[in-house]
C-alpha cells in the first residue's frame, strides 16, 4: 500500500493506493488562509501537521489494515511558501504563501544584486517565489531573519515532522529562486543575492528518491508499523503531472482550479523568462517542465459569484452548453496580479465593454472567456520557448462546466481531453512517487496516463470570433498597466 498526501492551500488531501494503483481510500481536512494585510497570505505550519493527522486518522478508521500495510508515502504541496525554522526546529513565524504579493520590490532588489539571475535560474523572480520573501523578512523582521536556520517549503516542513530529515525535491525547489534549474543544484550566486547560505537549504533529491522513514513516534500514531519510506515528492503541479501521466516530452495538461496552470513536460530545460514562463525541474529524474500560471482561474468565477450573490454553478448553468461566440464584454482576470505572461504582482483585474444591457449572463460569459484567454497567453508563451502543444488534458473543478471546456478548447485551438475516472491529482501523483521510492520502479512504467472519457474539440464556427476577441484582450494590459494598480 502507498499513501499520497497533498498539502494544498485550502485543504490537505490523502489518497491510498494498492500495488496496482487502485484507489483504496481518500480523505481530506480543510485549511484556512490568514490575510492580515492587503496582498498578504499566510498559514500556520502547525495547521498542516494537524490536518495531516486528521487525514490519516480518517483513512485508518475506514481502512485500518491498508494503513498498516503502507510501504511508501509521497508528498505533494503548494509551492513557494517560506517556512522559517530556527536551530531548535521551531517555526519562527507564519508561512508566507505562494499567493502573497508583498515582496514585489524585493524581486527588483535580487536582480540588482545579481544581474545573471535570469540566466542562472531561467526564470524571472516573482513576488510569490520564496527568495524574495526572505529579502522582505530581512528588511522588515530582522530578528526573525537572523534566527533562520532552515527555509522549508510547505510539504518539506511536513517531511521534517514525519522523518526528522531536511530534504526537498527538484520540482518544488525550482520555485524558490535559489536553484540552478538546468544543473539541478543550489546556486551559491542566487543564495548570496538574498544573503542566504547553502547550509540553510534542505538537501536536494529527486521526487522518486527515498528521503527517510517515519519516526517511530509518528509511525505508532499513524498505525504504520512498517515505518514506510517517504519519497522526495513534488510541487503540486509536478505531482499532478505524475498522476496524469504527463512525464514524457510534450505531454500537457491544463488545471482549472483556484489558480490555473498550463503545464508541459520537457526532456530538456526550456526557459522563456521574458514571458514569465516557469521553467522548472520535474518531479522525475532528468526531466523538466514549463508552466504558464494564472493566479485567478476558478477564483475569478467565485469572485463574480460573490458580487452577484449567486452560486457559481448556477451562473454557469444559466449559459447552457452551446457556444456561438464570445461575450460582448471583456474580462482581465488579474484579481491578485498575474504571473504568465506579465509577471506583475500589483496590477488588478478589469471588466470592460459594459452597457445598460449587460446582465449576469454577459459577465459570467466574460469571466469564462477571460480565463480561457489567460490560458491562451500561457500557450503562446510556451510556444515562444519552442514547445509544441498538440492537445491538453483538463483537470480541476472548472472541468465541471461543459461550456467552459468548449471555450478553452476554442480559445487554445487544440483538443481538450477529459480523463475517464479516478483521482489524477496531486495526492494520487504523490502516492505514485511513494510507490516508486519504496519499490524502485521506473516512472515510465508507473506514471501512465488515464483512459480518456471524451474529447472536447474547438468550435469551428466560433473560432474566428474568439481570435478577434483574443486580439482585443491582448491589448488591455499594455493600455492599463500603469494606471490599474492598488
Image (cartoon, grey):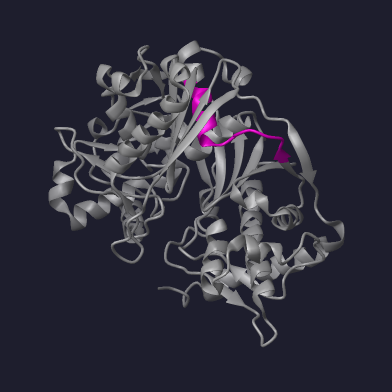
Whole-percent x, y for residue 110 in the image? 32, 51
Q: Is 28 left, or right, of 264 in this rendering?
A: left
Q: Is 126 left, or right, of 445 in this rendering?
A: left
Residue 183: tell me if it is visible.
Answer: no
Is residue 429 highlighted in magenta? yes
Q: Residue at x 39, y 45 (%)?
A: 117
Whole-percent x, y for residue 169 in the image? 41, 29
* Outermost residue toward the right in this view: 461
Q: Is 153 left, or right, of 25 in this rendering?
A: left
Whole-percent x, y for residue 224 in the image? 37, 17
Quadrant showing the C terminus: bottom left
Q: Is residue 302 above or below residue 241?
A: below
Q: Nearer the viewer, residue 120 or 17?
A: 17
Q: Is residue 346 above or below residue 188?
A: below
Residue 360 picture quarter: bottom right
Is residue 103 highlighted in magenta? no
Residue 163 picture quarter: top left
Count of numbered badges drawn on the protein: 0
* Outermost residue toward the front in this view: 61
Q: Nearer the viewer, residue 83 or 302?
A: 302
Residue 81: tell me if it is visible.
Answer: yes
Q: Nearer the viewer, residue 58 or 36?
A: 58
Whole-percent x, y for residue 313 in the image? 63, 60
Q: Is residue 99 above or below residue 201?
A: below
Q: Residue at x 31, y 43 (%)?
A: 47
Q: Is residue 296 above or below residue 419?
A: below
Q: Which residues are magenta?
A: 418-434
Amino acid at each position: 500500500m502507498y499513501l499520497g498526501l497533498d498539502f494544498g492551500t485550502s485543504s490537505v488531501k490523502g489518497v491510498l493506493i494498492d500495488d496496482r494503483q487502485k484507489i483504496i481510500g481518500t480523505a481530506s481536512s480543510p485549511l484556512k488562509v490568514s490575510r492580515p494585510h492587503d496582498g498578504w497570505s499566510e498559514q500556520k505550519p502547525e495547521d498542516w501537521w494537524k490536518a495531516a493527522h486528521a487525514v490519516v486518522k480518517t483513512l485508518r478508521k475506514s481502512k485500518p489494515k491498508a494503513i498498516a500495510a503502507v510501504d511508501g508515502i509521497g508528498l505533494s504541496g503548494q509551492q513557494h511558501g517560506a517556512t522559517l525554522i530556527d536551530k531548535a526546529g521551531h517555526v519562527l513565524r507564519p508561512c508566507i504563501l505562494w499567493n502573497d504579493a508583498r515582496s514585489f520590490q524585493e524581486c527588483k532588489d535580487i536582480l540588482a544584486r545579481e544581474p545573471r539571475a535570469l540566466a542562472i535560474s531561467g526564470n524571472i523572480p516573482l513576488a510569490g517565489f520564496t527568495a524574495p520573501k526572505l529579502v522582505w523578512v530581512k528588511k522588515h523582521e530582522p530578528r526573525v531573519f537572523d534566527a533562520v536556520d532552515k527555509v522549508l517549503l510547505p510539504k518539506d516542513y511536513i517531511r521534517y515532522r514525519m522523518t526528522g530529515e531536511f530534504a526537498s525535491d527538484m520540482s518544488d525547489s525550482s520555485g524558490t529562486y535559489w536553484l540552478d534549474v538546468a544543473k539541478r543544484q543550489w546556486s551559491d550566486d542566487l543564495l548570496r543575492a538574498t544573503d542566504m547560505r547553502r547550509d540553510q537549504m534542505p538537501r536536494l533529491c529527486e521526487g522518486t528518491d527515498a528521503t527517510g522513514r517515519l519516526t517511530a513516534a509518528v509511525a505508532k500514531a499513524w498505525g504504520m508499523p512498517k515505518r514506510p519510506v517517504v519519497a522526495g515528492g513534488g510541487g503540486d503541479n509536478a505531482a499532478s503531472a505524475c498522476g496524469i501521466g504527463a512525464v514524457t516530452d510534450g505531454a500537457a495538461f491544463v488545471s482549472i482550479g483556484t489558480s490555473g496552470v498550463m503545464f508541459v513536460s520537457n526532456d530538456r530545460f526550456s526557459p522563456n523568462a521574458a514571458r514569465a514562463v516557469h521553467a522548472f525541474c520535474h518531479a522525475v529524474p532528468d526531466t523538466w517542465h514549463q508552466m504558464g500560471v494564472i493566479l485567478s482561474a476558478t477564483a475569478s468565477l467565485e469572485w463574480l459569484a460573490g458580487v452577484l450573490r449567486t452560486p457559481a454553478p448556477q451562473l454557469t448553468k444559466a449559459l447552457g452548453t452551446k457556444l456561438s461566440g464570445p461575450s460582448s464584454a471583456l474580462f482581465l482576470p488579474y484579481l491578485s496580479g498575474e504571473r504568465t505572461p506579465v509577471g506583475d504582482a500589483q496590477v488588478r483585474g478589469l471588466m470592460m465593454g459594459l452597457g445598460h444591457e449587460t446582465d449576469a449572463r454577459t459577465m459570467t460569459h466574460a469571466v469564462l472567456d477571460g480565463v480561457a484567454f489567460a490560458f491562451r497567453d500561457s500557450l503562446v508563451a510556451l510556444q515562444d520557448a519552442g514547445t509544441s502543444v498538440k492537445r491538453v488534458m483538463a483537470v480541476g473543478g472548472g472541468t465541471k462546466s461543459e461550456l467552459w471546456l468548449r471555450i478553452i478548447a476554442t480559445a487554445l485551438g487544440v483538443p481538450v481531453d477529459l480523463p475517464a475516472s479516478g483521482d489524477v491529482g496531486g495526492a494520487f501523483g504523490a502516492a505514485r512517487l511513494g510507490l516508486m521510492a519504496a519499490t524502485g520502479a521506473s516512472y515510465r512504467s508507473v506514471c501512465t496516463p488515464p483512459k480518456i472519457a471524451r474529447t472536447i474539440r474547438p468550435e469551428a464556427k466560433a473560432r474566428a470570433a474568439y481570435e478577434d476577441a483574443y486580439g482585443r484582450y491582448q491589448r488591455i494590459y499594455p493600455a492599463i498597466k500603469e494606471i490599474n494598480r492598488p
